[in-house]
Amino acid sequence: MLTGYALGYDVALSDPLAPDWGPALLELPPGRELSGVIVDARTTEPVAAARVTLRVMTETRPAGEPDPLEGRRIVQDYTATSDEEGRYHVASIPSRAFRVIVEAEDYLPSKSDRYFGSSPDFDEDLVIALLPADHLAGTVLYDGQPVAGAQVELLRDRRPLAATTSDAQGRFRLPSAGADPLAPLTLEARDSQGRYARNTLELDAMAGDVDAALEMLGGEHELVLVDPVPLRVRVQGNSGPLAGAHVLAVSVGAWPTTAFTDAQGEVRLVHPLAIRSAPTVWLQARHRDRLSLTVRVDLEQPLPTDPIVLDVDDGGWFAGVVLDSFGAPISGATVSTRERRFTTSDVDGVFELGPAPLDDQGTTTLYAQAAGHRTGQWPESAPAGDLVLTLEPVVHWRGRASDGSTGDPLVSFQARLEADRGGSPTTWEQVETRVQRAGAPGEFSVELPDAGRYRLQVLTGEHIAAQSQPIEFDGVYEPAFTDLFLARAAVLAVRVEDAGGRPIPGYQVWLVPHEIAGERETPRGVEGAGLRHQLTDGNGSARFNLGAGGRMRLASGPGAWLDGGPFMVAPGPERERRIRVPSLGDIDLTVLDPADQPVGGFDVALNSVGATRVHSIRRQGRVEQAQQLIEVRALPAGDYELSIAHDDFEATRQTLQITGGRVLPTTIRLH
């Protein structure tokens, strides 16, 4: 899939493509405009001179690697500065694929990737609350008593931001400048006795929990020191003690502690605990390419006086070769256990895996997988050195999807595999399997699972779905190449707008076959398999694929017919019908708490109501940031029920009457 972008334009995505499919055309829509307000998260007052950056980025994943890491590359920065009223405006930007960065003096920077994969509501202000850059203050304690002279550090991603020393009363104070609301902060304390404490602070203001972030930033922080755990460890194998082995100690909330064994295979390490309630330290050792089993040290019991033994040759060891169905070795096959111990076969297909935990019967389950082969599973495998793991090849069913009227291959379509699940009549069920677009245009292949009876189905938005003839798959041989020809469907596009051309989102459109509609005066009570319904999108549009088509009627839900009678929708070019609603009204909504302060983080739903309603409307969403005014636009005249739900307040419902051509000011106070 290709992504296109240019400065001043929106992002465009191609249909899935394969090599040698010819030129790809990407049409870039014009850029969008985004406005909003920067406010102080504590006072909701506007923040002037804040720098707003919309950073357009691409997301990449290198091909050809078993588990490649995702990376992001900066493409373009769009910037703006908030005015005295905290307002900002950015023009000609893409609708998504950007990070929002806001920086202002005396505030923590705000960074959010929420619009990397989705789009903001460009019709409403994007309100961003900044956390003041306060000081972090608190007390260092041990056994309930303050600790003087403890070293206290503030870190972000393990990088120091500030440091200080607790005073005679155990008090400390650190500036939070440099903190990032989306990067975890860590407070750490150590004293001269090696005792340690660690607190992690999540300051995610952009997630909507501003109050919690402010409370955490400005509240009191207690760092309770915990005695470290002294551990004596010996690493050995079948040949005896192992020098230079890498030993790892881990406990809840603490950084890992590492050390290396001496010439006698022993090491003494001190593992700082982060919390007093940590019940366990886990130990593990690695020597060259051998990894020991994990050993649990129970801190609720007395520590052992003898060294804790980590044996890299303990547990089950498995060795052998991975072959294909013809007996040839498979290089690069992954062999693993249920506990996620894994290894990779070499150029001769040979592997060695261990140590692996065994069950009470001394066995485990082995898995092997390789590209182009089915995953193999061998339950109740006992440790052995001469295992032969044979993988069966993946069998593909290949086909081509073409337009039935022109014979041209289809560029955009979905293919899926269905299995015969028996019954009378036959029940077909979609199979979760890989579908690949490969070869010439319109061609695809589907991975077949075990032997059985299958068929292919191809769907598009402009054609009638087509199914292949069923095949009997024997689990070995590839079925014959299958051509699927799709007939053009009858497609109807419905656009709902007011007299001035303003689109109406959330409008319920019913499409009713004439044989179901009959001579009804209204659509109320209509039901049946032929009834189709959609809500219009943000552009006021709904689109229906009607298959073979037929005589239809158009309605606004159960309220009223929207046409003068039945009309014909035939297969072929897309047909469009435009619905005009004569009068629209608007709502200016303000939601306040008992102290008359704006409230954010609530769910809002708006539905048309009343037995005689002509137009059916549904709008719903979540307001994440506190803002003075929420504008709800383009509502046909009628009665509506407005619902507000918030975790900290009682649910509220209110009935509103919308009049065309008027803005209805509405204030709701939550309790």
Image (cartoon, rainbow, N blue to C red):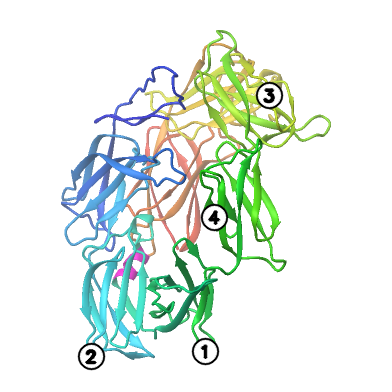
Q: Which mark is residue 302?
A: 1
In three-dimensional space, the C-alpha distance between marks 2 and 1, rounded to whole angstroms, equals 34 Å
Secondary-structure class at tag 2: loop
Q: Earlier in the sequence, mark 2 or mark 1?
A: 2
Residue 559 lies, with reference to residue 194, above or below; the image says above
Q: Is there a contact, CB below 8 Å, between mark 1 and mark 3?
A: no
Majority SS type along the magenta span: helix
The number of numbered discs placed on residues in the rendered structure image is 4
Q: Whole-Å distance between the Cαs marked 1 and 4?
A: 35 Å
The reply, left or right, for residue 388 in relation to residue 245 is: right
Marks 2, 1: nearer the viewer: 1
Q: Quadrant of the C terminus?
A: bottom left
Can the viewer see residue 564? no
- Going from N to C along the chain, the mark reached first, 4 or 3, is 4
Cα gap from disc 4 to disc 3, whole angstroms: 34 Å
- Any mark on residue 342, and which? 4
Q: Position of residue 216 (x, y in %)?
A: 34, 70
658 w.r.t. 509: above or below: below
The amino acid sitting under disc 2 is Ala
Q: Helix, strand or loop at disc 4?
A: strand
Q: Sequence order check: which comes first, mark 1 or mark 4?
A: 1
Of callouts 1 and 3, the N-terminal one: 1
Q: Amino acid at mark 3?
A: Pro
Residue pointed to by mark 3: 479
Read off the residue under disc 2: 168
Whole-percent x and y of residue 588? Answer: 36, 44
Q: What are the residue bounds of the magenta stretch?
A: 211-217
